[in-house]
Amino acid sequence: MTKTLLLIDGNSLAFRAFYAMYNQLDRMISHTGLHTNALVAFNNFLDQIVDPMQPDLAVVAWDAASGKQTFRGDLFSGYKDGRSKAPEEFREQFPYLREMVALHGLRNYEHPGLEADDIIGTFSRLGEAAGYQVTIVTGDQDLIQLATANITVNVTKKGVTEIERFTPAYIQEKYGLTPLQIIEKKALTGDTSDNYPGVTKVGEKTALKLLAQYHDLDQLYAQIDEMKPSKMKENLINDRDAAYIARQLATIQTDAELELPLAEIEYRGIDYDQLVPFYESLDFKQQLAKIKALKKSGQLTSQAILPESELQVVPLQADNLRVVAMLGDELALHIEMAGQNYHEDEMIGFVIGNAASGYYGSRDLTLLQTPELKTIVENPAIVKHVFNVKAQSVLFKRLGLILSGVTFDFLLAAYLLDTTANDNELSTLAQRFDIYVQPDEDIYGKGAKFAVPDDDALVLNHLGQKAAALMQLAEPTFAALTAHEQMHLYTDIELPLAHVLADMEYRGITIDQARLVEIGTDLTGRIQAIEDAIYLEAGEEFNINSPKQLGSLLFEKMGLPVIKKTKTGYSTAVDVLEKLAPQAPIVEHILQYRQLAKLKSTYVDGLLSVVNPKDSKVHTRFLQTLTQTGRLSSVDPNLQNIPMRSEAGRQIRTAFIPSQPDWQIFGADYSQIELRVLAHMTGDKNMQQAFLNGEDIHAETARAVFGLPSNAPVDALQRRTAKAVNFGIVYGISDFGLANNLGITRAQAKTFITTYFQEFPKVHEWMSEIKARAHEQGYVETIAKRRRYLPDIHAKNFNLRSFAERTAMNSPIQGSAADIIKIAMIKVANAIAEQHLQARMLLQVHDELIFEAPVSEIPTLTELVTQVMDSAVALDVPMQVESHYGNTWYDAK
DNA sequence: ACGCTCACG
DNA sequence: ACGTACGTGAGCGTC
């Protein structure tokens, strides 16, 4: 195997680490008063990137104490001048960073007169020459100039654990440059953070263009006289010296004199005996718990880690079942499953208990069906703490039990507290509250290697850890929900909704498989015919599904104009093909092929593959803790994107049928819910009036932006334009986006927007306010106090920041609409139960609800659902609900 | 595993 | 100078 050398840019990573956890600065202070945010983030980096690598040699390079003493300081007096001094909270962590590095088995190194870059540059060449595969990790993109076939430069992005891997090929692809040309680029652009100029007005785009033509500075200046006159040419000539100085500053030394031979930088591995007291001194509870868990599972033998008085789960069996009666009225309850699909995946075991009475569990799920446990599970007065109440509820249904009395669902609560960085794993989410639970992956492995260990005690103790965590988590979690004013959202919306959703999923929706097969056969014939036509027109057979092969046919062989490019080649997306259609008949055929092939593979074959053969139904899972806005999503299968817009696609809906004869499918949808929410939230009287008058909102918008008198007729184009403007408003308007959507100029789009805001002034005001609020508090909220954090709102990067600003405008609208339909769902479910209707809610598709019901109940259901949805939440504008029914989902239109 | 394309609101 | 409409999931090809 190839020997490996790992080189780490200590300063840049430490700096990144500090800011990666900057928002936690005040929270992360050790008992001695030391800030530990950079230490924690740096430790995560060592854990996740370095430890698993196990390199042969490793060095963490640090800048010499004073940057001014380097050759760069001699070269340019202003070097790094503008850089603000690192805050004291950062500098105080430095000595500990070095100690941490050493304890992780890596060599620290610095050298007078050199920056970390130069140490890395030199070691990388030494290592390469000695036959090592060299891996550099840094937070600074400048280092990518060092990349070669044997040297890879990994640059952290977003924090310190996500990395972008630069090889010469990748650099070529991304910038069209060789690694060494990165220096030339820097020479032209300069570096604002190191405070040296390049050529005036030359940014990245211009630099790349120049280098594509001239390759490097020398050649550029050799041919400068032939360049046609321009402002840029003048700038290039005037700033020639600056460019050459910048080039020297940007060049990393690869031949520095280092007094440290490769033989002395061997990677030594983690020194647990020293690391444990080190972590203890910094109060790194999670790290210590992790080490203890490793030791417990026998993966670690170190004296320093004392065996803990461990939580033991008592195995339940027929002869000791009665103990559970003494558990009291508040306990954690958890069924463990293998995989994500709780409708069909195997159940591995269960645990029940609390700290006072202990934890009990078994691999034998049938024990839950015994009277002793059944009465506990189904007793609403016994309070349960769980993780993912919807999944647990379905699992209990599979066992013939009704889970009742759940007041604490840590997954739901954690999602409401912060939607970001939610991987739906207990071990990860518990960390937010400084509670350590061993990741499932450690016990079971992942992917194809997933396996339940033979040792039952190991499994049960893992479940016990989870149960214990659930007991500990309740109090701090409720405190946080209260601080966010989210108890109503949690208790009255999400928690009851979870039970409603569990019922819907468990019930499922019936599929007419014969009908789907019939549609599939028809599609296959049509696809075949189009395929033949395409091959004839192309003069060859190829894979039409391959964008790569299709691109080379259309744009290279046939020479059609390239309208849009993707990262990897030519774009062949619908909008592109539609523009090309008039120029070649093959394009229209490709569009048809694409449409039908999509229907066949995703909706006919895809759906058939997930139909449960026992009940001929599909049982989707509505993910309740995934979207950033509060909407649900639907998987396995996704029933929220069944075709509707094209007739051919819509036919798929004829295969969705009621589960019983003489029943029908009934659907009810909110009309314009997002615009109504907008009118309510902004308080804009003009917009509210339009809804109060029951106007066609798009026509009314058209009159506003085209300056037409009230009641004036609006033509189709005006209405279409206005509709696009309304969409734009909801998405967080930008002239670029609107122009793109409507195929008009940016200036025209801008005029529409300006006029719109004049006509609906409060909407404009609200947009500004919500952005300002996002900036101030870092998050935005819906009417039910659902929260979305927008960390990028402070980004320096224009794109990231703009995105966050549009999100700030869109999320309260989309999220409030989600709040409303969730409330309606709970009320509808309750009303159906109270009135003892046979009707059942089956699906939610963001602004509509789908039911099945006996024909005889349709009038009652229409009245009930419309009324409940209408009045779910009282807004300053009326809601409008439309409903339809028929023998299949297709007919409920 | 990731990018592209396309289905929905 | 930069380069975007908001929120999702699935299938396919490519690496």
Image (tube, coloured by chain):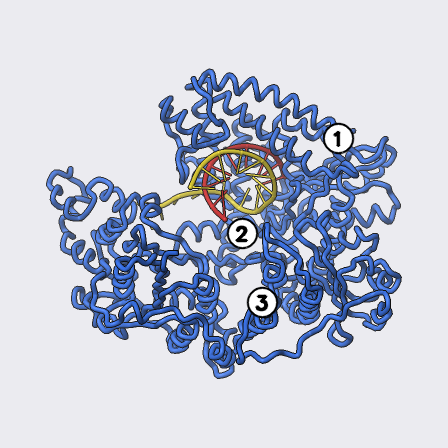
Chain colours: A blue, B red, C yellow
Instruction: Please state which of the two labelled residues, at mark 2 or mark 3, is closer to the viewer.
Output: 3
In the picture, which quadrant includes the C terminus of chain A?
A: top right
Task: Please name the residue that numbered disc 1 is placed on.
Answer: A512
Element carrying mark 2: helix
Crowd class of label 1 (few under 14; some 14 to 19; many from 20; radius 10 Å) = some
Instruction: Please state which of the two labelled residues, at mark 2 or mark 1, is closer to the viewer.
Output: 1
Question: Quarter-wise, where is residue A511 in the image?
Answer: top right
Crowd class of label 2 (few under 14; some 14 to 19; many from 20; radius 10 Å) = some
Foreground: A668 or C14? C14
- Side of A129 relative to A850 (left or right): left
Q: Percent from the top left, x then y, of residue A269?
A: 43, 70
Amino acid type shown at disc 1: Asp
Q: Which badge, 2 or 3, is on the more N-terminal residue?
A: 3
Depicted A765 relative to depicted A888: above or below: below
Task: Please name the residue that numbered disc 3 is placed on.
Answer: A431
**Residue A766: which numbered mark, if any?**
2
Q: Percent from the top left, x then y, of residue A240?
A: 14, 52
Spatial CA span between label 2 and label 1: 48 Å
